Amino acid sequence: MKVLKLIYKNLFRHKLRSFLTILGIAVAVFMFGFVSTVVTAWSYGVDAASADRLITRHAVSFIFPLPYSYRDQIAGVPGVSKVSYATWFQGVYKDASFQNFFPRLACDPETIFDVYPEFILPPDQLAAFKKQRNACVIGQKLVEQHGFKIGDIIPVKGDIYPGDWEFVVVGIYKGKDQTIDETQMFFSWEYLNERNRQAESFATDNVGWYIVQIANPNEAANVSETVDALYANSSAKTKTETEKAFQQSFVSLSGAIITSLEVVSYVIIGIILMVLANTIIMSARERIREYAVLRTLGFTSWHVVGLIAGESIFTSMIGGVLGILITFPMANAFGAAFPTMFPVFAVAPMTVVIAFSFSILVGVVAAIFPSFRSANMKIVDGLRQIG
């Protein structure tokens, strides 16, 4: 009990030094937690991918379209329960600024919400989406960001598909949980194809990719091989893979950036470790005579170790808790500012555990050298020490 009281006294003996040390640890923990959240958010699509969905795209590149005629053929493959399709539309809403960018996809209204059951759309809105040719369905986050509502017209200037386009909002979908992307806009592929046919576009009767729902996730490899075998000798060969692998292919393009961010997060912890270690060593050096006096009063070497380690661990623990508390509101603010870039930006429980564990580890490691030195110093040498 006396040791705990002494730890408390020592912790706030130099208030400014303690405050700056705690603040430094808090900033380090915050930066680690924030960068880790960025890394997690970057690859959220991989983790959220469904095991019973396959993606069939052009074998050469994702940017090349596939014939619409493939749909029925893929649906007839054993193990396939449902087939849908989508096409990346792009386009410009208002201007080309990042704030006005959000994914715009031409899809099959009849099946898109069947293969993506995690998108929750009221039945009456789904019926309206299927009925009206230029209708669109948008995510809840787009409503919050742009103020869209049912009945609004969203004008889009086409780039990949030139022309002026107008989409009527007939539905607003929500994700079944916070890990679901709510920043997309879906509209009817038939509406796009009609315009392409009138313009004699290269993309007429073509789709971007197929979403293939399978009955048994364990049969994913066999179904993929069967689908690709259908078009092995065609001019538009296919590559079918799990949705997770498909998402991973996009994330891997920025693999160097992600790795760099991860390295930076650990470097931050390493730097603050050295700063804290220096602070603890300096504090212990100043109190060598005090520790020697305590030893003469009957305190053991373990008491001295407890004083030094306790102060170090409490300092790092307070800083760690403060850093974690800062991380949550900052992450929420960042996610709200960039909803389309990071549709899901939430601090994962594992990130909190790792960040707090690092803060405790920093306190333990920083206390090792001064604790060993002070505990093993002779009392006479300690009393001669000038701080």
Image: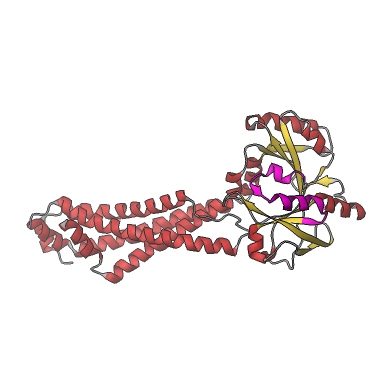
Q: Say whether residue 53 is left or right of residue 282.
A: right
Q: Position of residue 174 (x, y in %)?
A: 64, 53
Q: Is residue 154 above or below residue 213?
A: below
- Which residue shows up at 78% across the image and 60% down it? 168
The count of marks equals 0
Q: Position of residue 178 (x, y in %)?
A: 56, 52
In depth, the one of 327 and 108 nearer the eye is 108
Q: Which quadrant is home to the C terminus?
A: bottom left
- As drawn, the residue found furthest toward the front would be 124
> In which quadrant of the rendered view does residue 342 lie?
bottom right
Q: Say whether residue 293 is left or right of residue 232.
A: left
Q: Is residue 343 above or below residue 55?
A: below
Q: Position of residue 205 (x, y in %)?
A: 86, 46
Q: Is residue 271 above or below residue 259?
A: below
Q: Position of residue 94 (x, y in %)?
A: 74, 68
Q: How is the image coloured?
A: secondary structure
In depth, the one of 25 and 130 nearer the eye is 130
- As drawn, the residue found furthest toward the bottom would be 16
- Which residue shows up at 34% across the image and 68% down it? 20
